[in-house]
Image (cartoon, rainbow, N blue to C red):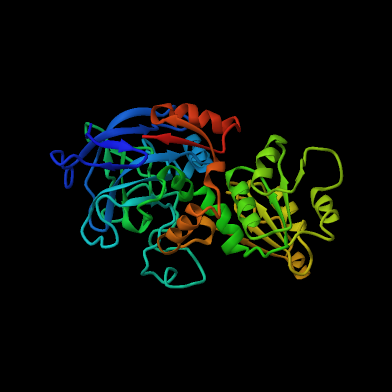
Amino acid sequence: MANHQNSANGWSKPSDQRTTGKVITCKAAVVWGPGQPFVMEQVQVDPPQKLEVRIKILFTSICHTDLSAWQGENEAQRAFPRILGHEASGIVESVGDGVKDMKEGDRVIPIFNGECGDCKCCKSEKTNICQNFGVNPFKKVMNNDGTSRFSTKDGKPIYHFLNTSTFSEYTVLESACVVKIDPEAPLKKMTMLSCGVSTGVGAAWNTANVQAASTVAIFGLGSVGLAVAEGARARGASKIIGVDINPNKFIKGQAMGVTDFINPSEPGKPLHERIREITDGGVDYSFECIGNLDVLREAFLSTHEGWGFTVVLGIHPTPKMLPLHPMELFHGRGIIGSVFGGFKGKSQLPHFAQECMHGVVDLDKFITHELPFEKINDAFQLLIEGKSLRCVLQL
């Protein structure tokens, strides 16, 4: 295994153990089939090619997207063996040819929704989609040559995941999917910005543009939903309604700014009617964070006629279509999807990281558990049982 110095405050390669340009053998959590336990394996990580970056992962956490990929919920997206993980922070170990915006030793965040800066979408202010390195759950190899940078000790390929593959001591990413952040940034907290917190806060700030004194309803109080609440609170929303079948989520939600809680499993009027009653006709903004079409319809109908706006954040695996009739849009309600909270990763995330460092968003609230990397199976179990928001693994 490659020797390294590792601490929460930084990392450096010993001068007599240069790894640049060499294959690194290190530890990774490999999943060999749908739902099979993660196995700690010695894997080989190739050097970065042109416009690629190899980073040393110091912290990684677990998201529901990792959970669904591990369980193989979408058969068309299955690819094994694979190194999952997409929420992390680390240090640049080496860069490939052509990488100009970062160097060895820089603190970085991997992002699943990249920003190449060159495509038509990246050049537009209207979207954070990237045509070259956008989120792609079907992608399993690198763009350069269509192969993997991971392999077993006997040379068999191990597939990549969501442009990132952070369940490994070292990983290789396209430089479009690596964000350089403040050298003083606390990396453990910054891990939250790789996915969940950026997705939720950004949905409130960028996608919906929540205004002060407005009303908000959030359907599903997992990490993303609570991040929406945190974003709405920071924007000065007057009422933030949290909807979840788990009453324990309201306790956590209150710390994030949730003012009212509705448990949809309790008997009573339809959910959207209850929300309309306590908001004088409906909320200004609703956020669907579950991935359930029935819930999406309730979220849409809970908004106010004339200007209500629904943001879809939940992943919907079903082939069924939107549960709306076109004529319902004539009532003035709008609906839109949001990827990575509308943040352009490389150009906008460094500023968001600065705001978090200054306390605009409290990242500590999202870290409910911490475990060593070797306990990754336990961390997944915490998420399955609904006991954790984010469990951070230290590598």
The residue sitting at the left extreme is 16
Q: Quadrant of the N terminus?
A: top left
Against 118, residue 257 (above or below) is above
Residue 181, percent from left and from top: 38, 55
In the image, 301: left or right of 74?
right
Q: Residue at x 27, y 34 (%)?
A: 26
Q: Quadrant of residue 158?
A: top left
Front residue of this view, candidates 186 and 25? 186
Front residue of this view, candidates 141 and 321? 141
In the image, 273: left or right of 225?
right
Front residue of this view, candidates 171 and 190? 190
Residue 82, percent from left and from top: 37, 38
Residue 111, percent from left and from top: 42, 52
In the image, 235: left or right of 154?
right
Q: Quadrant of the C terminus?
A: top left
Residue 69, percent from left and from top: 48, 40
Q: Residue at x 71, y 55 (%)?
A: 323
Residue 316 visible from this viewpoint: no
Q: Quadrant of residue 14?
A: top left
Against 328, residue 391 (above or below) is above
Residue 85 visible from this viewpoint: yes
